[in-house]
Amino acid sequence: MFDNLQLGLETAISPENLLWCFVGVMLGTVIGMLPGLGSATGVAILLPVTLGMEPVTALIMLAGIYYGSQYGASTSSILISTPGDSSSVVLTLDGYQMARKGRAGAALAVAALSSFLAAVISLIGLMALARPIADLALEFGPPENLAVILLGLATIVSFAGENMLRSLIMAAVGLLISMVGVASGFTTARFTFGNVNLLSGLDFVAVMIGIFAIGEVLQQIHRGGDPPIRARFRDLMLTKDEFRRSIAPAFRGTGLGFGLGVLPGAGATLATFMSYGLEKQVSKNRKEIGKGAVEGVAAPEASNNAAANASFIPTLSLGIPGSGTTAVLLGAFVIFGLQPGPQLFDQQPDLVWGLLVSFFFGNLLLLILNLPLAPVFAQVLRVPYSYLYPIILFMALIGAFAIGNNTFALWVVFGAGVFGYFMKRFDFPAAPLVLGLVLGPLLERSLVQTSSMGRGNLLILFERPISATLTVAAILAILAPVLLRAVRRRRRSALTSEREEIRQ
Amino acid sequence: MIDRRTTASLLALAATGLLVLSGCSGNAQGGEGDGGSPGRNITMIVPFSAGGGSDLAGRAIAQGLEDVTGSTVTVENIVGGSGAVGYSDLLAKEGDGTTLLASETALMTLPVVQDVQFSHESFTPIMKVGEDYNIVVVAADASYETCMDVVDAAAESSLTAAVSGATGPDHIAWSLIEDQHDISLERVTFESSAEVTAALLGGHIDVAATSPGEIVGQLESGDVKPLCALAPERYEYELLADVPTGAEQGIDVTFAQWRGFIAAGGVSEEHEQYWIDAAREYAETDAYETYIEDNMLQPQVLYGDEFRRYLDEYRQQVEAVLGDE
C-alpha cells in the first residue's frame, strides 16, 4: 500500500495536476453554490474541455468539481436558505438559523472543517479497504436497501419533537409528491393529468428551490424583512466552544456518511438526514438542534462529504457508480479509453492512486480557501433583505431552469414556493417533507423489487440476515423514543412519589 | 511544467465558462444557400440529462457533424418526462432544419406506453448510428452455460431476471424469449444497467440481459459469465468473439437498442438530404469508429428512408410486447 501511496503522490504532486486540481475544486465550489446546477451537470458540462489533457489530470479535475461542489452547496444553504443540491438541504435547518442569529461565519467555518475531517477520514478508508468494502456493499440487494430506507424514514420520528402530527403529515405529503410520474417497475403514469412534463415526476431540486428559497423570500416579505445582521467581522469567527461541540458530531456524521455512501442508490442525501436525526437523539445539545446549533451543521456536512468519497469505492473498485456524479465520471473513464471495472486498480495503479491522493490536496485547498472566506461570505447578510431577495429569486429561477433547460421547472418552483410559504406561516416543518420526497422513489423502487424477488411475499425482508437486522432496527428506532419517554415519565413519577414518602 | 496544452485547455475552459454563463444556445438563423445547408448554428437536442448514454452519443454525433460540416452544433439537454419533453420540443420545431435530436429507443416506447403527442412518424429520421444488442449474462459461479440452460431452468422453476427500466430493450427481449419458449421470468426492475450489474454480482437475481458496453469491466475480470448475444451475428470485439449468438443456441430473438439522430418533421427535402450526406460523411471518420468501439456497439448504419422502414418494423415489435401491458 505504501508503494501505491508513493506512486499516487508522485502523480498528484506534479504542478500540472495540482493546478487542475485547484481549478476543479474552484469550479466545483461555484457550481455547488448555484442552486440547480449540481455536480453531475457540472462534470458533464466541463468534460469536453478536459479531452486534451492526460486522463489522470482530467479525472483529477473532474473529481475536484465533485467534492468541491459539496463545499460550495453548503454555503448557499446556510446564507440564503437555498440548497445548492439535495444533500445540503439539511443545512437550511440549523445552518440558516445560525446565520439569522449572526453566526453565519461560524456555520460556514464548521461546515468547511467538518467537510475536511470527513474527507480525510473517508479517504483513508477508501484507500485502505476499497475492495473488501465494495464486496460488502454488493451484499446489499433490494431487500437490504428497502430496510435501510425504512430506517431512514424512521428518523422522521426524531425530527418531529413535539410536532409529531405535523411532521407525519409533511412526510406523507413528501411521499405523495414523489408518487407523481410513471410508477417504478411499471408503465402506468400517476397524477400526470396528461402532461408529459410530469411523466418523470416533479423534479426534486425544483421543489426544494421553491419551498426553501421562494418560500423564505415570501415569508420575509410578509414579515417585512429581517433587519440586516449587524455583526462585526470578529464576531463572525468560530468560537472555541463551537469548535469543541462540533468534533463528536462530525465524527459520527463521517461514519454514517461513509457507510451509506458506499451503497449505490441510497447515498449522500439520506446520509445527511440520518446523521442529523442521530444528533437529535444522542447529542448533548439535542434540545438546541433545529434552532441554530452547530451540531446540526457539523454532522450532516461531514456525512455529506464522507458519502461523496465513499461513492468512489464501488465506482473505482467495481466500475459501478455509487452516485449520480460518479456515473458521469465513469462515462469520462470510457471517453479516455480506460475500462472501469474490477481490474482498474491493477491495470492503472498510477491513475487510481494519483486520483485518490489528489483528493487529499483538493480537500486541503478547499479548506484553505473556505476557512478565510467564511466570514467574508457571511458579510452578504449585512446587505438589507430588500436588496438580497431579488438576487435570491433570480438565482433560484436560473437554477430551476438549468435543471433541464425546461421552463416547466419554473412553474414547479413557483407552486412549491407558495406551498412553502404557507408551510412556514402555519408552522409545518420542511425537513420531513424533504425526507419523504427523497425517500419516496427509493422506497417504492426497492419495495417493488423486493416484492418481485419474493414473488409477492415481503417476508423475504426477514429471511436475509442484513435486511432482517436493519428492519428490526428501523422498528426500534420508531418505538424507542416513545418507550424512552414512557420509561422516563414512570421513573420521574416514581422519584416524586419516593420524595413524597420521605417527606412524610 | 505548465505547457502549451495546459494553456490551451485553460483557454477552452474559459470559453466554455463564458458560453455557460451567457446561456448561449446560439439559435439558428444562419446563412442559407451553401450547399443546401440549413444554417451555421445547429442545435442537437439530447432528451436526457448530461452525462448519460444518450448525452455521450449526442455529444459524439454533434462533434462529428461539426467536423464534417463546419457548422457549430450546440448540444442542449432538454430533460423531463423520461425523454418526452425533449421530443415534444422537437415536435414544436416542425420544418426547422437547424434542430436535430440524439434519438434512441425511447422514441419508440414512449408513444406505445404513454399519452404523448408524437410518434416516430412525426419526425424525419436521418441516421441510425449503431445498434447496442443485449448479451445474456449470469454470475461467474452460476451453473448455466448457455442461454438454453436458462430457458430450461425457467421452465422448471421461477427465475428472476433483472431489467433496467420497465420498457427497456432488455425487457422487450425477455418478453420475446418468453413468448417463443413459453416460459415466464420474474422481472426485477432496476433504474440503470449499473444497478443491474450490482444485483447480479451480489447474487440477488439470477440472470440479466445487458449492453456489452455496460458490463465490459466485469466480463474482463471474469466476475460475470456471458451466455449468448441476442444479436444476428457474433460480435467482432475480442472480448465477445467467443460468445455465441442466441440463434446458435436455439433462441431466435434479436433485439437491440439503437442510437441515431433525427430532424424535425416537415423539413424540406433539400435539408433532409443535406443531413443524410453529412451523416454519410461522419460515418467514414475515425471519430465515428472510436465512438462505436468505445461503447461496443455494432456499426449497423441506416440513413433516411431505410432508417424509417427499420423504425416501422421496430414499432411493431415494441407494440406486440408493450402494447397490451
Image: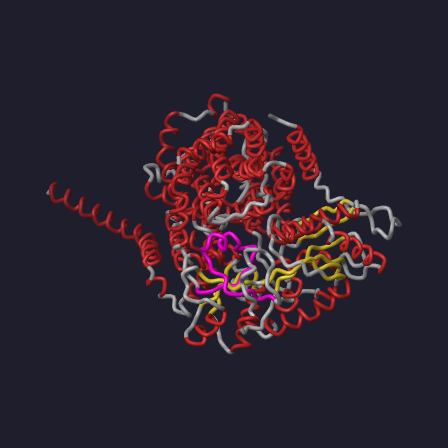
The vertical placement of B172 against A395, above or below, is: below
Q: Decide whether residue B220 is among the magenta residues.
A: yes
Towards the viewer: A189 or B241: B241
Q: Decide whether residue B146 is among the magenta residues.
A: no
Residue A187 visible in the picture: no
Please state if B104 lies on the left or on the right of A39 as rendered: right
Q: Which residues are magenta?
A: B206-231
Towards the viewer: A62 or B148: B148
Identify which residue is drawn at 38% across, 44% down: A256
In the rendered image, residue A308, in percent from the top left (x then y), is placed at: 47, 42
The vertical placement of A362 against A434, above or below, is: above
Q: How is the image coloured?
A: secondary structure
Identify which residue is drawn at 41% across, 56% down: A145
Q: Quadrant of the N terminus of chain B?
A: top right
In the rendered image, residue A278, in percent from the top left (x then y), is placed at: 36, 44
Residue B255 visible in the picture: yes
Towards the viewer: B229 or A469: B229
In the rendered image, residue A300, in percent from the top left (x then y), is placed at: 43, 40
